[in-house]
Amino acid sequence: MGLIGLRGEATNYTPYIDTPAGPLLRNPTEAACLSSGFGYRNASGGGRQHNGVDLANHDGGFVYAAGDGWIAFADYRGGYGNYIEIDHGHGVRTRYGHMAEFDSNLRSGVRVAAGQPLGRMGMTGNATGVHLHYEVVIDGLVVDPLHYGAPQAFQTTPVTQTYQEPVPVAPSEPSVALPPEPPPQPYPEPVRLQRPDGY
């Protein structure tokens, strides 16, 4: 995702997650908006963990393979509804749930290419609207596909010792005399533009 700004916004968004298996799409859909994020939910007073992101499109857009891999599972799976799991190798898997339909040729062991259409998003299983439930698993740990790889929050190191006097520094090697820097150039006067109506 790149750098995160002071307000938590992405300043350098990338559409790919860098994983041990290579790049994966952060949003493997034709077009969708985030309807529910990754993490703890406190719905109706009882909380639970949401292990993926929900990407919604009321028209039920296409869902694509996030990267090269092999189908590990493609069938109906309880609350996930129509569900596909892709093994990308190197301990990386992606999961796609609530699909309306998927390609009938996709079954365990079939190779898929990055960007290959898998099917269409839907609302099968435990779903209240048309969307894709998308999970990324790395080394057995479910990660947030939208924030995985983002830099860690800035942390300071606690001060353990202070000095009242300057700390002596070992002399360095003799430095080579650099030529003096030229004096700074003055800035040119700004150009003042006037509109034809005088303002």
Image (cartoon, rainbow, N blue to C red):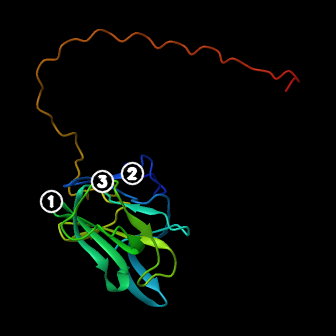
Q: Secondary structure at mark 2?
A: loop
The answer to whether the residue labelled 1 contacts the one labelled 2, judged by CB atoms less than 8 Å apart, is no
Q: Quadrant of residue 155?
A: bottom left
In the image, which is nearer the foreground, mark 1 or mark 3?
3
Residue 179's place in the image compared with 155, above or below, is above
Indicate the position of residue 143 as horizontal and vertical percent values: 29, 67
Q: Is residue 7 above or below residue 127?
A: above
Q: In the rendered structure, are the residues bearing label 1 and label 3 in contact, judged by CB atoms less than 8 Å apart?
A: no
State which tag comes first along the sequence, 2 or 3: 2
Which mark, residue 15?
2
Residue 192 as seen in the image, left or right of residue 1: right
Label 3 neighbourhood size at 10 Å, few (<14), some (14-19), many (20+)?
some
- Amino acid at the residue labelled 1: His
Q: Secondary structure at mark 1?
A: loop
Task: Tell me: 140 left or right of 106.
Answer: left
Residue type at the position of mark 2? Pro
Q: Determine contact: label 2, label 3, CB under 8 Å.
A: no
Disc nearer the start of the sequence (1/3): 1
| C-alpha distance separating marks 1 and 2 | 21 Å
Relative to 34, residue 155 above or below: above
Q: Which residue is mark 1?
A: 90
Instruction: Give the farthest residue toward the front.
Output: 105
Q: On the image, numbered disc 3 is attached to which residue?
A: 114
